[in-house]
Image: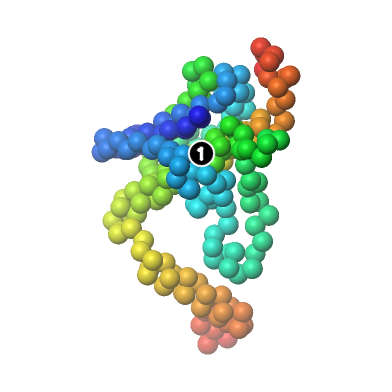
Amino acid sequence: MGLDHSLKLQIPFENARQAAIAKEVLRPDPILKPQDFQVDYTTDQNVLRVNFQSIDERVLRVGVSSVIDSIKTIIETIDELDTPSISTGSTI
Amino acid sequence: MLLPTAKYCGSDAETVKFEVNPADARYQTTDGRTTGASPYVLNAGQVDRDRPSEPRRDANGKITALGELRTRLTGLQDDINEFLTQRMELAKGKKPKLQGNQAKQEERIENEIKELLDGGDGEDDADGL
């Protein structure tokens, strides 16, 4: 059985730097069963794109909801801690 | 305005787009319907210490752009979770859960808990084991 269930998520941030931070924070998370579920993170300017592929709806639901929970935490952390003076920097 | 979107594509080539309506109350809260502790646990008196914080507000009391993004993403997450749960039910060959079924399920769990609290272990121990 292939990974024939997919979901593409697009999340626009305030700027490209925030989207890049989110991608770099999410990317190290290991996928426990890559034969059942895969996730790919890319950015296009200020937009974080997350592509999920899964063996079925159940695995997709668990994986997508878990990643969205992580993204919400990242958004909250940037909102609380990323000061404007830091945001003006060009590097992560 | 930061509006997250999603697009599902199933094995049967069905595609579904998920979009946010910022005016809808479901996209204005960080308290998701499909995340966090279940109503059953909360009704039993459990305190949800992991409940998400309210969206951040600036000095003028206005919700920040990232705070709004978090509320919209919470609503989108609920939409996706509810849709995929329905698809799971259909895949199992069952009808989507109805309120009546849910009430019966809760009653069954409550009875099992009551039975356990009364000392029963739910097993027939007539043979003395």
Q: Quadrant of residue A32?
A: top right
Q: Which residue was labeled with disc 1?
A: B73
- Judge left or right: residue B63 versus residue B11: right
Q: Nearer the viewer, residue A43 or B58?
A: B58
**Which of the 4 image quadrants contains residue B9?**
top left
Q: Is residue B7 left or right of residue A82?
A: left
Residue type at mark 1 is Leu
Vertical relation: B52 (above or below) A38:
below
Q: Position of residue B68 (x, y in %)?
A: 56, 37
**Count of numbered circles in the view:** 1
Q: Secondary structure at mark 1?
A: helix
Horizontal side of B93 relative to B38 (left or right) equals left
Picture residue at 57% right of the left edge, 46% below the top: B30
Residue at position x 49%, y 52% in the image:
B34
The colouring scheme, among rainbow, by chain, secondary structure or one colour, is: rainbow
Q: Residue at x 41, y 72 (%)?
A: B104
Q: Position of residue A6 (x, y in %)?
A: 38, 34
Q: Tell me if A4 is positioned left or right of B42 in this view.
A: left
Q: Position of residue A56 (x, y in %)?
A: 37, 42
Q: Which quarter of the figure has residue B71?
A: top right
Residue in the foreground of this view, choosing between A46 and A5: A46
Query: Which residue occupies 58% across, 57% down?
Result: B37
Query: Could one spot residue B46 in this view of the protein?
Result: yes
Q: What's the chain of the residue with tag 1?
A: B
In which quadrant is the C terminus of chain B drawn? Answer: bottom right
Work out whether B45 lies above or below B91. Answer: below
